[in-house]
Image (tube, rainbow, N blue to C red):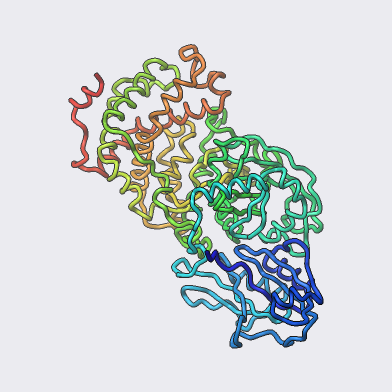
Amino acid sequence: MIRGIHHVSVHVRDLERMIAFYRDAFGFELVGEPFGWKEEPVLDALIDVLGSAARGAMLRTGNCYVELFEFQAPPGRTEPLSPQDRGYTHFCIDVTHDIEGEYARLKALGMTFGAPAPIDMGHVKSVYGRDPEGNVIELQQTAAHCDFRLDRLPDRMGEAEIGAVSGAVEATGHARGDDTGVLMPAHEAALRLGGAAFLTRAFHAFGSISPANSVTRIIRLEPCPGGSTGHKLFLSVAYALEEPGLQRDLFVKFSRDFTDSRRDHARHEMESEARFASVSRAPGFPIHVPRAYFGDFDHASGTGLLITARVAFGRDDIEPQREKCRDHEIDDPLPYYRALIAALARLAAAHKAGRLTADMEQRFPFDPAGAGVERVTGDAAALRRTVEGCRQFAADLPQLLPPALRAPEFYDRVLRDVLRIGENRDRLAAYLLGNRDLIALCHWNAHIDNAWFWRDDRQVLHCGLLDWGGVAQITFGSALWGCLSAAHTGMLENDLDALLMLFLQEYRAQGGAGIDAEELKRHFFVHVGVMGAARVLALHKVLLRRLPGGAAILGPHDPLVAEEEGLRTVLHIYTVLLTLWSKADLGAALDHVLGAEGGPVSPGRIRSASV
Protein backbone atom coordinates (compact mmCIF):
# COMPACT_ATOMS: atom_id res chain seq x y z
CA MET A 1 0.00 0.00 0.00
CA ILE A 2 1.33 3.44 -0.92
CA ARG A 3 1.63 5.51 2.23
CA GLY A 4 2.79 8.81 0.76
CA ILE A 5 5.94 10.78 -0.04
CA HIS A 6 8.79 9.93 2.32
CA HIS A 7 11.50 12.36 1.22
CA VAL A 8 12.83 14.64 -1.50
CA SER A 9 16.52 15.06 -2.26
CA VAL A 10 18.70 18.13 -2.91
CA HIS A 11 22.25 18.05 -4.32
CA VAL A 12 24.42 20.66 -2.53
CA ARG A 13 28.01 21.84 -2.78
CA ASP A 14 28.67 22.27 0.97
CA LEU A 15 26.87 19.69 3.12
CA GLU A 16 27.63 21.19 6.55
CA ARG A 17 26.65 24.67 5.47
CA MET A 18 23.33 23.49 4.05
CA ILE A 19 22.51 21.30 7.06
CA ALA A 20 22.93 24.42 9.20
CA PHE A 21 20.85 26.52 6.79
CA TYR A 22 17.89 24.14 6.67
CA ARG A 23 18.06 23.75 10.44
CA ASP A 24 18.02 27.49 11.13
CA ALA A 25 15.69 28.48 8.32
CA PHE A 26 13.03 25.79 8.57
CA GLY A 27 13.66 23.92 11.81
CA PHE A 28 14.61 20.69 10.00
CA GLU A 29 16.35 18.23 12.34
CA LEU A 30 19.35 16.09 11.46
CA VAL A 31 18.46 12.40 11.78
CA GLY A 32 21.42 10.37 12.99
CA GLU A 33 24.83 11.29 11.60
CA PRO A 34 25.88 12.34 8.08
CA PHE A 35 26.88 9.37 5.95
CA GLY A 36 28.99 8.78 2.88
CA TRP A 37 30.41 6.27 0.38
CA LYS A 38 33.07 5.79 -2.25
CA GLU A 39 33.83 2.86 -4.55
CA GLU A 40 30.74 0.99 -3.40
CA PRO A 41 29.32 -1.05 -6.32
CA VAL A 42 26.18 -1.81 -4.36
CA LEU A 43 25.41 1.87 -3.95
CA ASP A 44 26.35 2.56 -7.57
CA ALA A 45 23.71 0.03 -8.53
CA LEU A 46 21.17 1.39 -6.05
CA ILE A 47 21.31 4.98 -7.36
CA ASP A 48 22.13 3.88 -10.93
CA VAL A 49 25.29 6.03 -11.13
CA LEU A 50 28.65 4.37 -11.91
CA GLY A 51 31.72 5.44 -9.95
CA SER A 52 29.71 7.47 -7.44
CA ALA A 53 31.14 9.05 -4.31
CA ALA A 54 29.12 11.27 -2.01
CA ARG A 55 28.32 12.41 1.47
CA GLY A 56 24.76 12.84 2.66
CA ALA A 57 22.40 13.58 5.53
CA MET A 58 18.72 12.99 6.22
CA LEU A 59 16.74 15.86 7.73
CA ARG A 60 13.37 15.44 9.42
CA THR A 61 10.68 17.99 8.52
CA GLY A 62 7.14 18.47 9.78
CA ASN A 63 5.54 15.90 7.47
CA CYS A 64 8.31 14.16 5.47
CA TYR A 65 12.12 14.09 5.10
CA VAL A 66 14.66 16.01 3.00
CA GLU A 67 17.85 14.20 1.96
CA LEU A 68 20.93 16.29 1.20
CA PHE A 69 23.78 14.95 -0.98
CA GLU A 70 27.21 16.40 -1.70
CA PHE A 71 28.63 14.38 -4.63
CA GLN A 72 32.38 14.19 -5.23
CA ALA A 73 32.01 11.94 -8.28
CA PRO A 74 31.08 11.72 -11.07
CA PRO A 75 30.93 15.37 -12.19
CA GLY A 76 27.44 16.76 -12.59
CA ARG A 77 25.96 19.97 -13.86
CA THR A 78 27.17 22.91 -11.79
CA GLU A 79 24.08 25.10 -11.96
CA PRO A 80 20.90 24.20 -10.06
CA LEU A 81 17.70 23.66 -12.02
CA SER A 82 15.20 26.43 -12.61
CA PRO A 83 11.42 26.02 -12.44
CA GLN A 84 11.11 25.67 -16.24
CA ASP A 85 13.68 22.84 -16.49
CA ARG A 86 12.64 19.23 -16.88
CA GLY A 87 12.66 16.93 -13.87
CA TYR A 88 12.42 17.65 -10.16
CA THR A 89 12.90 21.37 -9.82
CA HIS A 90 11.79 22.48 -6.35
CA PHE A 91 10.12 21.56 -3.11
CA CYS A 92 7.53 23.60 -1.23
CA ILE A 93 7.46 24.69 2.41
CA ASP A 94 3.96 25.03 3.86
CA VAL A 95 3.51 28.06 6.17
CA THR A 96 0.63 27.96 8.67
CA HIS A 97 0.37 31.73 9.13
CA ASP A 98 2.21 35.05 8.57
CA ILE A 99 3.96 34.14 5.32
CA GLU A 100 5.15 37.74 5.04
CA GLY A 101 6.99 37.40 8.34
CA GLU A 102 8.58 34.12 7.22
CA TYR A 103 9.61 35.75 3.92
CA ALA A 104 11.46 38.49 5.81
CA ARG A 105 13.06 36.03 8.24
CA LEU A 106 14.32 33.75 5.45
CA LYS A 107 15.76 36.69 3.50
CA ALA A 108 17.75 37.59 6.59
CA LEU A 109 19.09 34.02 6.71
CA GLY A 110 20.35 34.14 3.13
CA MET A 111 17.48 33.17 0.84
CA THR A 112 16.86 35.25 -2.27
CA PHE A 113 13.46 35.87 -3.85
CA GLY A 114 12.45 37.16 -7.26
CA ALA A 115 9.25 38.83 -6.02
CA PRO A 116 9.29 41.67 -3.46
CA ALA A 117 6.64 39.88 -1.35
CA PRO A 118 4.49 36.74 -1.40
CA ILE A 119 1.80 36.91 -4.09
CA ASP A 120 -1.83 36.37 -3.09
CA MET A 121 -3.62 34.14 -5.61
CA GLY A 122 -6.82 33.94 -3.56
CA HIS A 123 -6.67 30.28 -2.60
CA VAL A 124 -2.96 30.45 -1.77
CA LYS A 125 -0.21 32.99 -1.08
CA SER A 126 3.05 31.86 -2.67
CA VAL A 127 6.55 32.95 -3.62
CA TYR A 128 9.56 31.15 -5.13
CA GLY A 129 13.06 31.70 -3.79
CA ARG A 130 16.50 30.09 -3.70
CA ASP A 131 18.58 28.78 -0.83
CA PRO A 132 22.20 30.00 -0.45
CA GLU A 133 23.33 27.52 -3.16
CA GLY A 134 20.58 28.48 -5.58
CA ASN A 135 18.19 25.56 -5.13
CA VAL A 136 14.56 26.55 -5.68
CA ILE A 137 12.24 26.53 -2.67
CA GLU A 138 8.62 27.62 -2.72
CA LEU A 139 6.88 29.17 0.29
CA GLN A 140 3.11 28.85 0.41
CA GLN A 141 0.29 29.65 2.80
CA THR A 142 -3.04 28.10 1.84
CA ALA A 143 -6.35 29.82 2.48
CA ALA A 144 -9.13 28.16 4.46
CA HIS A 145 -11.05 27.30 1.27
CA CYS A 146 -8.02 25.89 -0.57
CA ASP A 147 -8.57 22.33 -1.86
CA PHE A 148 -5.00 21.11 -1.28
CA ARG A 149 -4.36 22.15 2.31
CA LEU A 150 -2.14 19.80 4.31
CA ASP A 151 -4.80 19.32 6.96
CA ARG A 152 -7.16 17.97 4.27
CA LEU A 153 -5.00 14.92 3.72
CA PRO A 154 -6.99 11.88 4.92
CA ASP A 155 -6.38 10.49 8.38
CA ARG A 156 -5.93 6.79 7.73
CA MET A 157 -5.54 5.69 11.31
CA GLY A 158 -8.19 3.58 12.96
CA GLU A 159 -8.70 3.12 16.69
CA ALA A 160 -6.15 0.31 16.91
CA GLU A 161 -3.51 2.42 15.17
CA ILE A 162 -4.27 5.42 17.38
CA GLY A 163 -3.82 3.20 20.43
CA ALA A 164 -0.54 1.93 19.02
CA VAL A 165 0.67 5.49 18.42
CA SER A 166 -0.23 6.51 21.96
CA GLY A 167 1.51 3.43 23.32
CA ALA A 168 4.60 4.21 21.28
CA VAL A 169 4.71 7.71 22.76
CA GLU A 170 4.52 6.26 26.27
CA ALA A 171 7.31 3.81 25.43
CA THR A 172 9.66 6.31 23.77
CA GLY A 173 8.70 9.41 25.74
CA HIS A 174 8.47 11.53 22.60
CA ALA A 175 6.07 12.66 19.88
CA ARG A 176 6.52 14.93 16.87
CA GLY A 177 4.61 18.22 16.82
CA ASP A 178 2.18 18.65 13.94
CA ASP A 179 3.01 22.33 13.43
CA THR A 180 6.75 22.74 14.05
CA GLY A 181 7.85 19.15 13.35
CA VAL A 182 9.94 19.21 16.52
CA LEU A 183 10.32 15.90 18.35
CA MET A 184 8.83 16.80 21.74
CA PRO A 185 9.33 15.16 25.13
CA ALA A 186 6.09 13.75 26.53
CA HIS A 187 7.10 13.78 30.20
CA GLU A 188 9.66 15.14 32.66
CA ALA A 189 12.27 12.41 32.21
CA ALA A 190 12.34 12.91 28.44
CA LEU A 191 12.68 16.67 28.89
CA ARG A 192 15.60 16.15 31.26
CA LEU A 193 17.21 13.86 28.71
CA GLY A 194 16.78 16.41 25.91
CA GLY A 195 18.03 19.19 28.15
CA ALA A 196 19.29 22.51 26.85
CA ALA A 197 19.81 21.14 23.32
CA PHE A 198 16.12 20.29 22.96
CA LEU A 199 15.01 23.64 24.38
CA THR A 200 17.26 25.43 21.91
CA ARG A 201 15.76 23.52 18.96
CA ALA A 202 12.22 24.10 20.21
CA PHE A 203 12.71 27.81 20.87
CA HIS A 204 14.34 28.27 17.45
CA ALA A 205 11.47 26.45 15.73
CA PHE A 206 8.93 28.62 17.54
CA GLY A 207 10.86 31.84 16.92
CA SER A 208 11.25 32.54 20.65
CA ILE A 209 14.99 33.21 20.51
CA SER A 210 17.19 34.47 17.71
CA PRO A 211 19.06 31.96 15.51
CA ALA A 212 22.33 33.05 17.13
CA ASN A 213 21.07 32.41 20.67
CA SER A 214 20.73 29.17 22.59
CA VAL A 215 19.73 27.70 25.93
CA THR A 216 23.02 26.84 27.63
CA ARG A 217 21.72 24.97 30.67
CA ILE A 218 18.73 24.10 32.81
CA ILE A 219 19.01 25.68 36.24
CA ARG A 220 15.79 24.38 37.78
CA LEU A 221 13.25 21.73 36.79
CA GLU A 222 10.72 20.90 39.51
CA PRO A 223 7.13 19.61 39.64
CA CYS A 224 4.36 22.21 39.75
CA PRO A 225 1.33 21.06 41.76
CA GLY A 226 -2.31 21.54 40.81
CA GLY A 227 -4.37 21.50 37.67
CA SER A 228 -6.76 18.93 36.29
CA THR A 229 -4.86 17.73 33.20
CA GLY A 230 -1.32 16.79 32.32
CA HIS A 231 1.93 17.05 34.25
CA LYS A 232 3.39 20.50 34.97
CA LEU A 233 6.87 21.77 35.84
CA PHE A 234 8.70 24.88 36.94
CA LEU A 235 11.65 25.49 34.60
CA SER A 236 14.50 27.99 34.88
CA VAL A 237 17.17 28.28 32.18
CA ALA A 238 20.28 30.22 31.19
CA TYR A 239 20.82 31.66 27.69
CA ALA A 240 23.98 32.29 25.70
CA LEU A 241 22.88 35.82 24.85
CA GLU A 242 20.74 38.44 26.57
CA GLU A 243 17.76 39.51 24.47
CA PRO A 244 15.09 42.12 25.31
CA GLY A 245 12.19 40.61 27.23
CA LEU A 246 13.70 37.12 27.34
CA GLN A 247 12.58 35.38 30.53
CA ARG A 248 14.54 32.76 32.41
CA ASP A 249 11.78 31.49 34.70
CA LEU A 250 9.34 29.40 32.67
CA PHE A 251 6.35 27.10 33.07
CA VAL A 252 6.09 23.71 31.38
CA LYS A 253 2.83 21.91 30.71
CA PHE A 254 2.52 18.44 29.20
CA SER A 255 -0.78 17.22 27.79
CA ARG A 256 -0.04 13.73 29.08
CA ASP A 257 -0.03 12.26 32.55
CA PHE A 258 1.00 8.62 32.26
CA THR A 259 0.51 8.07 36.01
CA ASP A 260 -3.16 9.12 36.12
CA SER A 261 -5.54 7.84 33.42
CA ARG A 262 -8.25 10.31 34.44
CA ARG A 263 -5.99 13.30 33.88
CA ASP A 264 -4.47 11.76 30.76
CA HIS A 265 -7.96 11.29 29.29
CA ALA A 266 -8.25 15.08 28.89
CA ARG A 267 -5.00 15.33 26.89
CA HIS A 268 -6.64 16.69 23.73
CA GLU A 269 -7.58 19.91 25.54
CA MET A 270 -4.07 21.14 24.76
CA GLU A 271 -4.47 20.89 20.98
CA SER A 272 -6.21 24.25 20.65
CA GLU A 273 -4.12 25.68 23.50
CA ALA A 274 -0.94 25.02 21.50
CA ARG A 275 -2.43 26.80 18.49
CA PHE A 276 -3.47 29.69 20.72
CA ALA A 277 0.09 29.98 22.06
CA SER A 278 1.29 30.78 18.56
CA VAL A 279 -1.52 33.25 17.87
CA SER A 280 -0.96 35.05 21.18
CA ARG A 281 2.53 36.14 20.13
CA ALA A 282 1.20 38.38 17.35
CA PRO A 283 2.02 42.09 17.77
CA GLY A 284 -0.82 44.02 19.37
CA PHE A 285 -2.52 40.96 20.83
CA PRO A 286 -5.50 42.47 22.70
CA ILE A 287 -5.06 40.90 26.15
CA HIS A 288 -2.26 39.84 28.47
CA VAL A 289 -1.30 36.15 28.41
CA PRO A 290 1.97 34.49 29.47
CA ARG A 291 4.55 34.81 26.69
CA ALA A 292 4.73 31.55 24.75
CA TYR A 293 8.19 30.07 24.13
CA PHE A 294 7.00 26.81 22.55
CA GLY A 295 3.71 25.13 21.86
CA ASP A 296 2.90 22.15 19.65
CA PHE A 297 0.73 19.06 19.60
CA ASP A 298 0.67 15.62 17.99
CA HIS A 299 -2.98 14.96 17.18
CA ALA A 300 -2.52 11.24 16.54
CA SER A 301 -1.36 10.48 20.09
CA GLY A 302 -2.80 13.46 21.97
CA THR A 303 0.69 14.46 23.04
CA GLY A 304 1.52 18.13 23.41
CA LEU A 305 3.99 20.44 25.08
CA LEU A 306 3.56 24.06 26.12
CA ILE A 307 6.34 26.25 27.52
CA THR A 308 5.49 29.79 28.61
CA ALA A 309 6.77 32.52 30.85
CA ARG A 310 6.07 31.89 34.52
CA VAL A 311 3.84 34.40 36.30
CA ALA A 312 5.58 35.76 39.42
CA PHE A 313 2.63 35.72 41.80
CA GLY A 314 3.25 37.91 44.85
CA ARG A 315 6.29 39.64 43.30
CA ASP A 316 7.07 42.57 41.01
CA ASP A 317 3.73 44.32 41.70
CA ILE A 318 1.75 41.16 40.83
CA GLU A 319 -0.76 40.20 43.49
CA PRO A 320 -0.71 36.75 45.13
CA GLN A 321 -2.76 34.20 43.22
CA ARG A 322 -6.45 34.32 44.10
CA GLU A 323 -8.20 31.07 44.97
CA LYS A 324 -11.41 30.08 43.26
CA CYS A 325 -14.65 30.43 45.25
CA ARG A 326 -13.03 32.46 48.05
CA ASP A 327 -14.15 35.91 46.95
CA HIS A 328 -15.60 36.53 50.43
CA GLU A 329 -11.98 36.95 51.59
CA ILE A 330 -11.48 39.91 49.21
CA ASP A 331 -12.57 43.32 50.51
CA ASP A 332 -14.05 44.29 47.14
CA PRO A 333 -14.15 41.58 44.44
CA LEU A 334 -15.88 43.78 41.85
CA PRO A 335 -12.70 45.33 40.35
CA TYR A 336 -11.30 41.85 39.74
CA TYR A 337 -14.35 40.81 37.76
CA ARG A 338 -14.42 44.10 35.89
CA ALA A 339 -10.85 43.34 34.76
CA LEU A 340 -11.76 39.76 33.77
CA ILE A 341 -14.93 40.74 31.91
CA ALA A 342 -13.13 43.53 30.04
CA ALA A 343 -10.39 41.11 28.94
CA LEU A 344 -12.94 38.62 27.61
CA ALA A 345 -14.69 41.39 25.69
CA ARG A 346 -11.44 42.65 24.15
CA LEU A 347 -10.46 39.21 22.89
CA ALA A 348 -13.92 38.51 21.48
CA ALA A 349 -14.00 41.90 19.75
CA ALA A 350 -10.54 41.46 18.25
CA HIS A 351 -11.63 38.16 16.75
CA LYS A 352 -14.90 39.49 15.37
CA ALA A 353 -13.21 42.63 14.00
CA GLY A 354 -10.57 40.56 12.18
CA ARG A 355 -7.64 41.90 14.19
CA LEU A 356 -6.15 38.50 15.07
CA THR A 357 -4.27 36.37 12.53
CA ALA A 358 -5.72 36.09 9.04
CA ASP A 359 -6.18 32.33 9.35
CA MET A 360 -8.24 32.35 12.56
CA GLU A 361 -11.13 30.43 10.99
CA GLN A 362 -8.65 27.79 9.89
CA ARG A 363 -6.96 27.56 13.28
CA PHE A 364 -10.17 27.77 15.32
CA PRO A 365 -13.09 26.72 13.09
CA PHE A 366 -16.50 27.11 14.67
CA ASP A 367 -17.74 23.77 15.99
CA PRO A 368 -21.26 23.83 17.50
CA ALA A 369 -20.38 20.81 19.65
CA GLY A 370 -17.53 22.73 21.28
CA ALA A 371 -19.23 26.11 21.67
CA GLY A 372 -20.14 25.62 25.33
CA VAL A 373 -23.85 24.82 24.97
CA GLU A 374 -24.69 21.81 27.11
CA ARG A 375 -27.17 19.23 25.87
CA VAL A 376 -30.15 18.75 28.19
CA THR A 377 -30.79 15.03 28.58
CA GLY A 378 -33.45 13.08 30.41
CA ASP A 379 -37.22 13.18 30.14
CA ALA A 380 -39.60 15.33 32.16
CA ALA A 381 -39.70 12.82 35.02
CA ALA A 382 -35.92 12.86 35.35
CA LEU A 383 -35.82 16.65 35.33
CA ARG A 384 -38.50 16.75 38.02
CA ARG A 385 -36.51 14.36 40.20
CA THR A 386 -33.47 16.59 39.87
CA VAL A 387 -35.33 19.71 40.99
CA GLU A 388 -37.04 17.83 43.82
CA GLY A 389 -33.61 16.75 44.94
CA CYS A 390 -32.58 20.40 45.04
CA ARG A 391 -35.67 21.22 47.11
CA GLN A 392 -34.87 18.44 49.56
CA PHE A 393 -31.23 19.46 49.80
CA ALA A 394 -32.32 22.97 50.80
CA ALA A 395 -34.70 21.53 53.42
CA ASP A 396 -32.14 19.14 54.91
CA LEU A 397 -29.08 21.43 54.86
CA PRO A 398 -30.47 24.99 54.90
CA GLN A 399 -27.33 26.38 56.56
CA LEU A 400 -25.40 25.82 53.32
CA LEU A 401 -27.60 28.14 51.26
CA PRO A 402 -28.70 31.80 51.52
CA PRO A 403 -32.24 32.28 52.90
CA ALA A 404 -33.74 33.15 49.51
CA LEU A 405 -32.62 29.81 48.12
CA ARG A 406 -34.28 27.72 50.85
CA ALA A 407 -37.93 28.61 50.22
CA PRO A 408 -40.07 25.78 48.71
CA GLU A 409 -41.87 28.25 46.44
CA PHE A 410 -38.53 29.16 44.85
CA TYR A 411 -38.15 25.56 43.71
CA ASP A 412 -41.67 25.66 42.25
CA ARG A 413 -40.36 28.36 39.91
CA VAL A 414 -37.18 26.44 39.18
CA LEU A 415 -39.23 23.36 38.33
CA ARG A 416 -41.52 25.32 36.02
CA ASP A 417 -38.53 26.77 34.17
CA VAL A 418 -36.68 23.45 33.98
CA LEU A 419 -39.66 21.67 32.47
CA ARG A 420 -39.95 24.41 29.85
CA ILE A 421 -36.26 24.06 29.07
CA GLY A 422 -36.62 20.30 28.75
CA GLU A 423 -39.64 20.57 26.46
CA ASN A 424 -37.86 23.14 24.25
CA ARG A 425 -34.28 21.92 24.49
CA ASP A 426 -33.71 21.90 20.72
CA ARG A 427 -35.18 25.37 20.22
CA LEU A 428 -33.06 26.80 23.01
CA ALA A 429 -29.90 25.17 21.70
CA ALA A 430 -30.68 26.57 18.26
CA TYR A 431 -31.19 30.02 19.81
CA LEU A 432 -27.85 29.93 21.65
CA LEU A 433 -25.93 28.70 18.62
CA GLY A 434 -27.87 30.48 15.90
CA ASN A 435 -26.57 34.03 16.23
CA ARG A 436 -22.92 34.13 15.14
CA ASP A 437 -22.69 37.71 16.42
CA LEU A 438 -22.77 36.14 19.90
CA ILE A 439 -19.98 33.62 19.23
CA ALA A 440 -16.24 34.36 19.22
CA LEU A 441 -12.86 33.02 20.27
CA CYS A 442 -12.79 33.30 24.06
CA HIS A 443 -11.69 31.75 27.35
CA TRP A 444 -14.31 29.32 28.66
CA ASN A 445 -12.99 29.13 32.24
CA ALA A 446 -11.89 32.64 33.23
CA HIS A 447 -12.32 32.11 36.97
CA ILE A 448 -10.33 34.36 39.25
CA ASP A 449 -7.71 31.62 39.87
CA ASN A 450 -6.97 31.44 36.13
CA ALA A 451 -5.69 35.00 36.07
CA TRP A 452 -3.05 37.28 37.51
CA PHE A 453 -3.66 40.85 38.64
CA TRP A 454 -1.69 44.06 39.10
CA ARG A 455 -2.46 47.78 39.55
CA ASP A 456 -1.18 50.63 37.41
CA ASP A 457 0.03 54.00 38.67
CA ARG A 458 -3.58 55.13 39.11
CA GLN A 459 -4.36 51.99 41.12
CA VAL A 460 -6.60 50.65 38.37
CA LEU A 461 -6.65 46.84 38.45
CA HIS A 462 -5.59 44.90 35.33
CA CYS A 463 -5.41 41.19 34.59
CA GLY A 464 -3.84 38.56 32.38
CA LEU A 465 -5.45 35.20 31.66
CA LEU A 466 -3.94 31.75 32.18
CA ASP A 467 -4.80 28.14 31.29
CA TRP A 468 -6.18 28.21 27.75
CA GLY A 469 -6.87 24.49 27.45
CA GLY A 470 -9.86 23.87 25.17
CA VAL A 471 -9.91 27.46 23.87
CA ALA A 472 -12.39 27.72 21.01
CA GLN A 473 -15.08 29.83 19.45
CA ILE A 474 -17.78 29.76 22.13
CA THR A 475 -21.01 31.60 22.85
CA PHE A 476 -20.86 34.80 24.87
CA GLY A 477 -23.15 33.14 27.41
CA SER A 478 -20.59 30.38 27.88
CA ALA A 479 -17.71 32.85 28.26
CA LEU A 480 -19.61 34.95 30.81
CA TRP A 481 -20.80 31.94 32.79
CA GLY A 482 -17.25 30.56 32.78
CA CYS A 483 -16.06 33.77 34.40
CA LEU A 484 -18.93 34.46 36.82
CA SER A 485 -19.91 30.95 37.92
CA ALA A 486 -17.43 31.06 40.81
CA ALA A 487 -17.93 34.74 41.70
CA HIS A 488 -19.18 36.26 44.95
CA THR A 489 -22.97 35.82 45.08
CA GLY A 490 -23.52 39.23 46.69
CA MET A 491 -21.66 40.89 43.85
CA LEU A 492 -23.81 39.03 41.31
CA GLU A 493 -26.99 40.14 43.05
CA ASN A 494 -25.92 43.79 43.03
CA ASP A 495 -23.60 44.24 40.05
CA LEU A 496 -24.48 41.68 37.37
CA ASP A 497 -26.19 44.21 35.10
CA ALA A 498 -23.23 46.56 35.36
CA LEU A 499 -20.80 43.74 34.47
CA LEU A 500 -22.84 42.74 31.43
CA MET A 501 -22.95 46.38 30.33
CA LEU A 502 -19.17 46.63 30.81
CA PHE A 503 -18.69 43.61 28.54
CA LEU A 504 -20.86 45.25 25.89
CA GLN A 505 -19.15 48.65 26.15
CA GLU A 506 -15.65 47.17 25.97
CA TYR A 507 -16.70 44.91 23.10
CA ARG A 508 -18.03 47.86 21.11
CA ALA A 509 -15.02 50.05 21.95
CA GLN A 510 -12.70 47.39 20.54
CA GLY A 511 -14.56 47.04 17.26
CA GLY A 512 -17.20 44.43 18.08
CA ALA A 513 -20.66 45.04 16.69
CA GLY A 514 -24.05 43.50 16.13
CA ILE A 515 -25.48 43.05 19.64
CA ASP A 516 -27.36 45.18 22.17
CA ALA A 517 -27.64 45.09 25.94
CA GLU A 518 -30.97 43.28 26.14
CA GLU A 519 -29.90 40.60 23.68
CA LEU A 520 -26.66 39.97 25.57
CA LYS A 521 -28.49 39.70 28.90
CA ARG A 522 -31.14 37.41 27.43
CA HIS A 523 -28.49 35.19 25.84
CA PHE A 524 -26.63 34.93 29.16
CA PHE A 525 -29.68 33.92 31.17
CA VAL A 526 -30.84 31.35 28.61
CA HIS A 527 -27.34 29.86 28.77
CA VAL A 528 -27.53 29.76 32.58
CA GLY A 529 -30.91 28.01 32.45
CA VAL A 530 -29.79 25.41 29.93
CA MET A 531 -26.52 24.83 31.79
CA GLY A 532 -28.43 24.44 35.03
CA ALA A 533 -30.92 21.94 33.61
CA ALA A 534 -28.19 20.01 31.83
CA ARG A 535 -25.63 19.77 34.60
CA VAL A 536 -25.38 22.18 37.51
CA LEU A 537 -28.69 21.50 39.31
CA ALA A 538 -27.59 17.88 39.66
CA LEU A 539 -24.57 18.95 41.74
CA HIS A 540 -26.63 18.55 44.91
CA LYS A 541 -26.10 14.79 44.46
CA VAL A 542 -22.33 15.29 44.42
CA LEU A 543 -22.56 17.41 47.55
CA LEU A 544 -24.58 14.80 49.44
CA ARG A 545 -21.97 12.15 48.61
CA ARG A 546 -19.01 14.29 49.59
CA LEU A 547 -20.18 16.36 52.55
CA PRO A 548 -18.25 15.15 55.62
CA GLY A 549 -20.81 15.26 58.42
CA GLY A 550 -23.83 16.77 56.69
CA ALA A 551 -25.97 18.58 59.24
CA ALA A 552 -22.99 19.13 61.56
CA ILE A 553 -21.41 21.57 59.08
CA LEU A 554 -22.02 25.15 60.18
CA GLY A 555 -22.19 26.78 56.75
CA PRO A 556 -20.47 27.22 53.38
CA HIS A 557 -17.37 28.72 55.03
CA ASP A 558 -17.00 25.93 57.57
CA PRO A 559 -13.37 24.70 57.35
CA LEU A 560 -14.62 21.22 56.49
CA VAL A 561 -15.94 22.73 53.25
CA ALA A 562 -13.75 25.78 52.68
CA GLU A 563 -10.43 23.97 52.96
CA GLU A 564 -11.37 21.23 50.49
CA GLU A 565 -11.16 22.88 47.08
CA GLY A 566 -13.28 20.39 45.17
CA LEU A 567 -16.12 20.45 47.68
CA ARG A 568 -15.95 24.22 48.11
CA THR A 569 -16.07 24.74 44.35
CA VAL A 570 -19.03 22.44 43.76
CA LEU A 571 -21.08 24.03 46.55
CA HIS A 572 -20.29 27.56 45.45
CA ILE A 573 -21.04 27.04 41.74
CA TYR A 574 -24.30 25.32 42.70
CA THR A 575 -25.16 28.34 44.87
CA VAL A 576 -24.27 30.79 42.08
CA LEU A 577 -26.55 28.93 39.67
CA LEU A 578 -29.46 29.12 42.11
CA THR A 579 -28.70 32.78 42.86
CA LEU A 580 -28.92 33.65 39.17
CA TRP A 581 -32.07 31.55 38.86
CA SER A 582 -33.68 33.54 41.67
CA LYS A 583 -33.53 36.67 39.50
CA ALA A 584 -36.60 37.32 37.39
CA ASP A 585 -34.39 37.75 34.32
CA LEU A 586 -34.10 34.03 33.66
CA GLY A 587 -37.83 33.46 33.36
CA ALA A 588 -38.18 36.62 31.28
CA ALA A 589 -35.46 35.42 28.92
CA LEU A 590 -37.27 32.10 28.43
CA ASP A 591 -40.55 33.95 27.83
CA HIS A 592 -38.96 36.11 25.17
CA VAL A 593 -37.23 33.27 23.33
CA LEU A 594 -40.01 30.69 23.59
CA GLY A 595 -43.04 32.98 23.48
CA ALA A 596 -46.53 31.57 23.94
CA GLU A 597 -45.67 28.26 22.28
CA GLY A 598 -43.14 27.52 24.97
CA GLY A 599 -45.20 29.06 27.73
CA PRO A 600 -45.35 28.15 31.40
CA VAL A 601 -46.15 24.63 32.51
CA SER A 602 -49.60 24.40 34.07
CA PRO A 603 -49.97 24.68 37.88
CA GLY A 604 -51.44 21.20 37.98
CA ARG A 605 -48.31 19.74 36.46
CA ILE A 606 -46.19 21.59 38.99
CA ARG A 607 -48.25 20.21 41.87
CA SER A 608 -48.11 16.69 40.51
CA ALA A 609 -44.35 16.99 40.22
CA SER A 610 -44.13 17.84 43.92
CA VAL A 611 -46.05 14.81 45.14
- Height in image: 592 above or below 129? above
Quadrant location of the C terminus in the rendered image: top left
Q: Residue furthest top?
A: 552
Quarter where residue 528 is shown: top left
Q: From what the image shows, is residue 67 above or below residue 446?
A: below
Q: Is residue 462 visible?
A: no
Displayed quadrant of residue 50: bottom right
Q: Image check: 19 left or right of 305? A: right
Quick check: 511 left or right of 389?
right
Circle count: 0
Residue at 51% x, 65% y is 358
Q: Is residue 53 left or right of residue 489?
A: right
At x 61%, y 58%, the residue is 281
Q: x and y percent of residue 534 in the render?
A: 36, 36
Q: Is residue 247 above or below residue 320?
A: below
Can I make out residue 413 in this image? yes
The percent position of residue 532, horizontal first and vertical second, equals 37, 34
> Residue 606 placed where, x, y %?
22, 26
Task: Please state the horizontal and vertical placement of residue 112, each as a whole percent of the image.
Answer: 68, 80
Which residue sits at x=78%, y=68%?
35
Image height check: is 196 above or below 86? Answer: above
- x 58%, y 23%: residue: 563
Q: Which of the two residues, 292 or 506, is positioned nearer the viewer here?
A: 292
